[in-house]
């Protein structure tokens, strides 16, 4: 069964190798250099450059709808023959939101609450970026259910970075 792997930047190469990923989504500050693991071809890598913020702030790039539409489109092109690797700097906020969004976009029958609970179970430090989730909720016409489900799991455990984990496409 195909699944999504979430990782912090510091464990990117290790995660690509360990989980056998062939497609990757990067959500990180635009000027951050990200060495692409050898397993990931350039054509199978989406780089989304924006800051991990909830509201626009001077000198920072805030997430917008176009980021979400690119994320969803890339996820839909993923062939699901190997895991999809999603990462941000810490593997806590942007990447966990992107994994949650991608799973729901690919499997619209998923229950938002059950998936959010699975996310919390598999990643105790996950604190999905609320702006990303809200933008996706609107685009995917989930009528606030994604936002409510993520709010229900609350802020994750304090951590400098998350541990790589799997988020299934079914729960």
Image (cartoon, grey):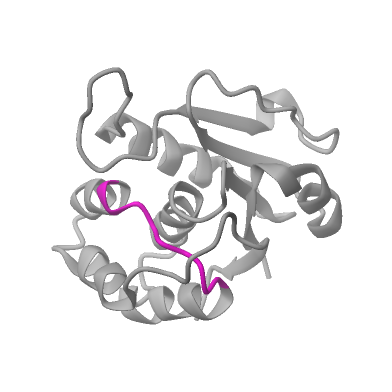
Q: In the figure, is residue 113 to the left or right of 44?
A: left
Q: What residue is shown at x 67% (from left), y 27% (from top)?
A: 34
Image spot of residue 44 (x, y percent):
67, 32
Q: What residue is shown at x 35% (from left), y 52% (from top)?
A: 129
Q: What residue is shown at x 64% (from left), y 31% (from top)?
A: 45
**Front residue of 40 and 158:** 158
Numbered circles on residues, count: 0
Image spot of residue 94 (x, y percent):
44, 47
Which quadrant holds residue 1? bottom right
Which quadrant holds residue 26? top right
Q: In the figure, is residue 166 to the left or right of 171?
A: right
Q: Which residues are magenta?
A: 123-131
As drawn, the residue found furthest toward the left would be 143
In the displayed structure, 67 sits above or below 117; it is: above
Residue 158 counted in the magenta span: no
Q: In the figure, is residue 34 to the left or right of 156?
A: right
Q: What residue is shown at x 48% (from left), y 28% (from top)?
A: 29
In the displayed structure, 166 sits above or below 22; it is: below
Majority secondary structure of magenta residues: loop
Residue 127 counted in the magenta span: yes
Image spot of residue 135 (x, y percent):
24, 46
Image spot of residue 80 (x, y percent):
66, 54
């Amino acid at each position: 069964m195909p699944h999504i792997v979430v990782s912090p930047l510091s464990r990117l190469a290790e995660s690509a190798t360990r989980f056998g990923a062939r497609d990757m989504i990067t959500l990180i500050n635009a000027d951050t250099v990200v060495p692409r693991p050898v397993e990931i071809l350039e054509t199978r890598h989406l780089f989304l450059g924006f800051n991990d913020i909830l509201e626009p702030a001077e000198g920072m790039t805030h997430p917008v709808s176009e980021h979400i539409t690119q994320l969803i489109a890339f996820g839909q092109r993923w062939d699901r023959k190997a895991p999809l690797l999603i990462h941000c700097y810490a593997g806590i906020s942007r990447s966990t939101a992107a994994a949650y969004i991608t799973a729901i976009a690919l499997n619209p029958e998923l229950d938002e609450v059950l998936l959010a609970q699975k996310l919390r179970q598999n990643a105790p430090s996950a604190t999905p970026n609320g702006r990303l989730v809200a933008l996706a909720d609107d685009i995917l016409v989930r009528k606030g259910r994604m936002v409510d489900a993520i709010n229900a799991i609350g802020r994750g455990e304090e951590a400098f970075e998350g541990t790589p984990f799997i988020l299934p496409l079914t729960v």
